[in-house]
Amino acid sequence: MGILAKLKSMVDSGFTVLPDVPALTQRQERGLALGAPYAAGDSLPVNALTTGADALAAARVLDQSWDVHDAQSARAAYRFLLDGGGHRGIYGCVRGYLNAGWDLTAAEERDRIEQATREIPAIAIQRGERPDVALTYFQSAWPSRAMMQANHPRRTVESIAAWDAARVVHVSRFIVDAGYLHPDEAWAAIDAAVQMAQPEYPSWEEFQLGFLAGRVFWQSNAGFDAQEISADFRRYTSSGKSLLSKPDSPWLRSPW
């Protein structure tokens, strides 16, 4: 295949497709589709477990963003995302208090916040989470609550497991590129992410809502300002719409 034909094949669909790579199995396609929000939003390949970066660049990203620098820390990252870690536990403590629109009066908003402040600590203790951490997450996420809700009718997104599942795929690309783990081990972690996410959602549409809610929930507590959160939300909302509508989308090739 000539260089022009290769470039054409990569951009025709709107999704990045690497030419001349081994075909994925059906199981691998299904697993890689979990990371499609990142692939579509960041122009990463939808048909290969790679970022396209060299080993040094991949290692730099892992060190700076994940505190991953070898096989042991790569496996620790997987455990954090898969074994009840991530932000799922804290979100479960506070999600019921984020189900409020923008039409609250000042008095209603004050009442909601006071109720959450009274009740969240006990819920956190029951769930094995730190009360102070749960309250901090609630307070930080409250201004961005609309981005963690589904509309028509409005409801709080029940699970953010989608975001952790997508991150398993995303970090796996860098781990494989850096050479920290054999691809077979990365694919096994992705299989575990599939098993974690599937019971949480009935469709890719709901998975997308969980991904967006999880990302906003994290950003609200990670020092991002409102403008940055909103811009990021629009970016990944747009990529999600493409994944749900374009005929060659990995989500349409691998039904939920």
Image: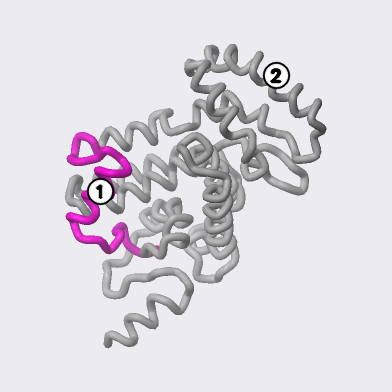
Is 161 in front, or is 53? 53
- At 45% from the left and 69% from the top, the residue drawn is 15
Distance between mark 2 and mark 1 Cα atoms: 44 Å
Q: Is residue 31 left or right of residue 116?
A: left
Measured from the top left, where is residue 10 in percent x and y?
38, 75
* Camera-nearest label, 2 or 1: 2
- Pointer 1: what residue? 175
> Which mark is on residue 114?
2
Tell me, yes or no, whether the highlighted magenta stretch contains residue 57: yes
Measured from the top left, where is residue 83 in percent x and y?
39, 29
Question: Which amino acid type is marked by label 1?
Answer: Ile
Using the image, determine if residue 73 lies above or below residue 132.
below
- At 25% from the left and 61% from the top, the residue drawn is 53
Q: Secondary structure at mark 2?
A: helix
Measured from the top left, where is residue 174 in percent x and y?
28, 51
Q: Is residue 5 left or right of residue 128?
A: left
Is 177 in front, or is 42? 42
**Can residue 197 be spotted in the picture?**
no
Q: Earlier in the sequence, mark 2 or mark 1?
A: 2
Q: Which residues are magenta?
A: 46-74
